[in-house]
Amino acid sequence: MVLSDLEICKPTSTSHNKVGISRSGRDLPPAHYLFKIESYSELMNTGVEKYETNVFQAGGYKWRLILYPSGNIKSNGNGYVSLYLAIADTEKLSSGWEVDVNFKLFVFNQKNNNYLTIQDADGTVRKFQEMKTEWGFEQLISLETLLDSSNGYHVEDSCLFGAEVFVISRSGKWESLSMVKEPPHGTFTWKIGKFSTLEETYYHSKSFTVGERDWNLRVYPRGIESERGKGLSVYLQLTDCERFPAKRTVYAKFKLGILDQLNNKYHERTDSHWFRASGNIWGFKKLVALSELYEAAKGYIKDDTVIVEVQILVMSIAKIST
């Protein structure tokens, strides 16, 4: 009797909560523990019900394998090898302890030099706790299959079993991302006085906070690049990138505007951008033409003061929790 490379079967023990069992083959040895039995038939002849291995460590906990060489008769393992993973030294764990585990058990095929891998189907996670300290398979492999040397699992009366144990940690971080419309305090107004005397290439507003991120406005009074000498350049800048990972991004849809102080009405333009450390500024090279800016009838300059404003319409807010 030879097992196929992949076999799905239904367990007959209620200990598996009716979860299927997956059997497959792989070349890579088990990551955490190997257990070799020499003179397997002699072990069976002793009449021993089960054998418990030494303790090994994986995922920050101590474990052992429990082998029923002739099957766990009390749990429908008659005619099979039964193998279980058991958590060890539980008296050292805190009261009410629980450990969530995804594990695999193995039987080495000495003929094909690969491993029969047995695990719960669909990546089922098992919960080890005070009332349930072991999980495994009553029908790991049939004795008929194991003891037939032509199958490769039992050669010169020796067998090799193994285990991989992956603990699902509950201490991991999780992230929530929200696209917030009109976030609180999302409007910032900047009055730029003595505008006619400004000589620097650009100026920054004071910092303001929206969505727990820090921003400012940058204004080029005489324009920038292709609009230098032609337009008033205004940008929204994310200023706290150094506090976050380099690839952390923040989305903002926003309006930038300049106030017509005669009619109390903003001339506005809308844009959006994913802000990051390598691209933390976005806006308009020409929010308004300089010819219009200095035209008195437009009302953009009054008492030598220009008023620009940003309104963040939509913003992504990411929160990291543990």
Image: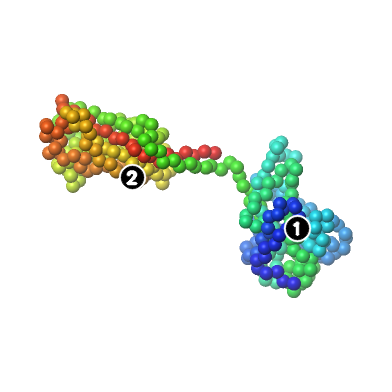
Q: Tell me which amino acid carries mark 1.
A: Thr
Side of 197 relative to 248 (left or right): left
Disc 2 is placed on an element classified as: strand
Write the residue at 70% across / 62% down: 9
Indicate the position of residue 87 as horizontal and vertical percent values.
Answer: 72, 47
The quadrant where residue 153 appears: bottom right
Indicate the position of residue 307 as horizontal and vertical percent values.
Answer: 22, 30
The residue at the far bottom in this view is: 150
Work out which quarter of the rendered image holds the N terminus and state it. Answer: bottom right
Report how far apart the C-alphas of labels 1 and 2 lie in the structure.
58 Å
Q: Is residue 313 visible?
A: yes
Write the residue at 16% across / 40% down: 289
Q: Is residue 55 visible?
A: no
Image colouring: rainbow
The residue singled out by tag 2 in the image is 273
Write the residue at 70% across / 54% down: 18
The quadrant where residue 139 appears: bottom right
Disc 1 is placed on an element classified as: loop
Residue 86, compared with residue 148, is above or below; it is above
The residue at the far top in this view is: 303
Q: Residues within 10 Å of mark 1 (few under 14, many from 20)?
A: some
Work out which quarter of the rendered image holds the C terminus and state it. Answer: top right
Q: Nearer the viewer, residue 29 or 250?
A: 250
Q: Residues within 10 Å of mark 2 (few under 14, many from 20)?
A: some
The residue singled out by tag 1 in the image is 12
Residue 249, compared with residue 50, is above or below; it is above
Foreground tag (1 vs 2): 1
- Asked whether disc 1 touches disc 2, contact meaning CB atoms under 8 Å apart, the reply is no
Q: Tell me which amino acid carries mark 2.
A: His
Q: Nearer the viewer, residue 124 or 25?
A: 124
The quadrant where residue 142 appears: bottom right
Residue 3, compared with residue 47, is above or below; it is below
